[in-house]
Image (cartoon, rainbow, N blue to C red):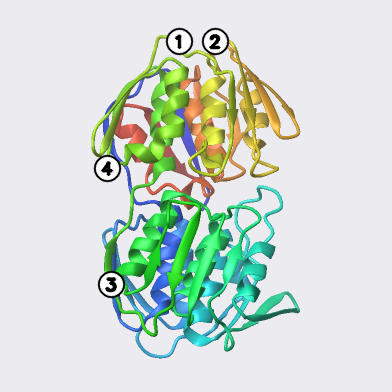
Amino acid sequence: MMSRILIEGGTPLAGAVDVHGAKNAVLPILAATVLSEGVHVIHNCPKLKDVSITVEMLRYLGAKVTREDDTLIVDTRGHLGNHIPEKLMRELRSSIVFMGAILARNKRAKISAPGGCELGPRPIDLHIKALRELGASIRESHGYIICNGSQMRGANIHLSFPSVGATENIMLAACLTEGRTVIENVAKEPEILDLQNFLNRMGAKISGAGSSQITIDGVKELYAAEYTVMPDRIVAATYLCGAAASGGRVEIRKVVPEHLSATLSVLRESGCEISSGEDWVSLCAPERLQAVREITTMPYPGFPTDAQSLFLAMLAVADGTSIIKETIFESRFKPAEELVRMGADITVDGRIAIVQGVKKLSGATVSAKDLRGGAALVIAGLCAEGVTEVENPCYIDRGYAHLVEAFEQLGAKIKRVEY
């Protein structure tokens, strides 16, 4: 069964909407359940395609997983395997964090190279180099990465780039490894802190998440825990960009405003009025958005690469010329071609996009090619004249539990149809 999203543009968004749990926090936390024997209770787990694939991996390993609304109950008692097949690994980029978790529990792991959205080369050499520095023996054979962690010990590790995945993998591998591990130049993303908090709830001894250095003192055993996953900052940014592009006024609830600092700064520069409280952010869009001089994607706390496509769509209808520089992934400008079909004036040169704002976009049939690019096309449809059809919403399902319903709640004329 195929589906597409239909949007009749021109209605300013209005009202309030809640943000669900963070995809990029849920996945490593679910992988972390492998580290102990027991029954974990993980709240605020959205019903995403990527979460479903992660659950399949846990079940393949031998865990029992049940869902009650937005809570996942993960039973990791008994024997868990050390092998994840290529079919599952290729569906999900972040599945690589299972390598560290399985290695820590079983001292052996066999996985294939991961997949996910095609955003350009995303090598896992940082993961492998770091695990080798911990003392793991790693070799590649017939497309699989085969690891032996029987000789692992704490180590000092310096990452050449603050990779989120590599940081998480080291944390998972090191928390049950004898000795102290110190990781320098780590990723500072809030999802790293969420993983640290969950692991510490399990009995790990980890400190420093959110700074450039994380210290892990290995323990002999971890225990099952109950935990609530942090809200998704990119989902929040999606709702805010939709409101800004459509000229709306919205309140986004169940968020951590501090996590949105970089995106809120750009929204203010575009002319939006922003207010915030402990767990909410409100936005009131101007009559016409203003171009922003330059957006450069950077590791947190810089502007997130995951939000770049959303702002590409929003700035397509801003007055003036905006420049977006992508420093993280090579192929992040895929939505540009589809936005041009809707009347946008966007020129892409390598990792730079020049966005000359137009008065209006026109509805068209466009195709999602990756997760955030798909969400960007929905944002464009909200402010376009006429009807926009977004094909391949399966990409959007990877990171949004109910994007159509959320925008519908805010007054958008939007629906999903099967055919």
Contact check, label 1 and label 2, Cβ < 8 Å: yes
> Measuring 44% from the left and 23% from the top, which residue is drawn there?
267
Measured from the top left, where is residue 192 in percent x and y? 44, 56
Contact check, label 4 and label 1, Cβ < 8 Å: no
Measured from the top left, where is residue 246 in percent x and y? 42, 20
Contact check, label 4 and label 2, Cβ < 8 Å: no
Measured from the top left, where is residue 64 in percent x and y? 36, 79
> Measuring 50% from the left and 20% from the top, which residue is drawn there?
384
Amino acid type of the residue tagged 2 in the rendering: Asp
Quarter occupied by residue 127: bottom right
Disc nearest the viewer among 3 and 2: 3
Q: Please, what secondary structure does the residue beneath circle 1 have?
A: loop
Q: Looking at the image, is 8 positioned above or below residue 304?
A: above
Left or right: 271 as drawn, with respect to 302: left
| Mark closer to the chain start, 3 or 2 | 3
Residue on which the image places disc 4: 254
The answer to whether residue 52 of the structure is visible from this angle is no
Q: Looking at the image, is 209 positioned above or below residue 150?
A: above
User: Spatial distance from mark 1 to mark 2, Cα to Cα?
Assistant: 7 Å
Disc nearest the viewer among 3 and 4: 3
User: Spatial distance from mark 4 to mark 1, Cα to Cα?
Assistant: 28 Å
Residue on which the image places disc 1: 288
Q: Nearer the viewer, residue 209 or 128?
A: 209
Q: Which mark is residue 2?
A: none
Residue on which the image places disc 2: 319
| Mark closer to the chain start, 3 or 4 | 3
Left or right: 195 as drawn, with respect to 173: left
> Dot 2: within a 10 Å radius of its alpha carbon, few (fewer than 14), some, or many (20 or more) residues?
some
Residue on which the image places disc 3: 225
The answer to whether residue 389 of the structure is visible from this angle is yes
